[in-house]
Amino acid sequence: MVSRPLVFSLAVYGAPFSAQASQTAYAFAKALIDVGHRLERVFFYQDGIHAANVLAVPPQDEENLTEAWHSLAREHQVELVVCIAAALRRGLLNGEEAQRYGKPASNLAPGFEIAGLGQLLEAAVTSDRLITFGA
Amino acid sequence: MKNLLFVSRHAPYGTGIAREALDALLGASAYGQNLSLLFMDDGVFQLLNAQNPSKLNQKNLSANLPALPLYDVENIFVHSESLRARALHADDLVLEPKLFKVISSQEVAELMNQQDQLLSF
């Protein structure tokens, strides 16, 4: 275990199944928690937001990252935040946004919340480390 | 107040990365931190003047750049080796010379060392 635990936040910009970023970010998240650091927030932006799509059905022999992030977050009190601007333009909606824009369905996975870009900034300011996983 | 450096390394069109980097930067300006912006690698193409992406059905990304000081982004840096590798010159750029500083790889390293966090795009 580390002698001086740090507060980390992650920024994930790559789409699951298209870019390695999402998978690597998840592996990094687990690793930093395992050695005793604290993971405060994971901010999903750009194509990274697809990790929060509850409708994704990956083949059974591939990891379901959406569920994996959810259980990690539940177990270690991690905030999973999806950028609202990035989510809306890519068709990722929670119930409230679906209603606001008159869309027939919502698809934000449990454990994730939709919020503004300010949450990325706040993570940068309040965490000891912000690590970006780009596309 | 923290020192936050946005590093923008992708071309303005072809992917949404540069556009969403700029969105993040403009959003960040509301938080009263010490913001800097560095264009390097293909990111220097974002600065080219006379961009006309209307045939791509895209918004002109460079239209926002001269307004960055209004958003409290006053430290704008351009990596000199990235310009040179792409045969670009400081006078090809959409920003007035007084708005940005061209810096070497060595100075990029120093700039990064002064930051509390890097936001890489």
Image (cartoon, coloured by chain):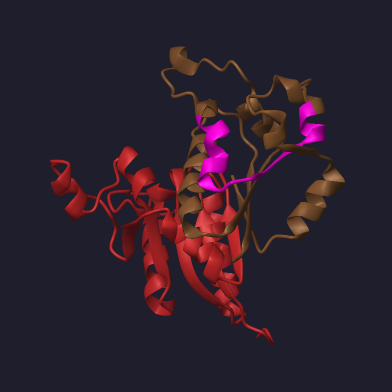
> Which chain is the one coloured red?
A
Quarter the N terminus of chain A occupies: bottom right
Dividing the picture into quarters, in which one does residue A103 lie? top left
* Chain B on-screen colour: brown
Q: Nearer the viewer, residue A20 or B11?
A: B11
Quarter the C terminus of chain A occupies: top right
Find residue B91 and report its horizontal and vertical position in percent.
74, 21
Residue under the point 45% across and 44% down: A46
Visible residue check, residue A67: yes
Q: Is residue B69 magenta?
A: yes
Instruction: Examine the rendered structure and indicate whether residue B4 appears above or below residue A135.
Output: below
Instruction: Examine the rendered structure and indicate whether residue A78 appears above or below residue B53.
Output: below
Q: Residue furthest right?
A: B106
* Left or right of A81, for residue A129: right
Magenta span main SS = helix
Dividing the picture into quarters, in which one does residue A31 lie? bottom right
Find residue B30 and report its horizontal and vertical position in percent.
46, 54
Residue under the point 40% across and 64% down: A80
Tag count in the figure? 0
Q: Magenta segment, which residues?
A: B64-83
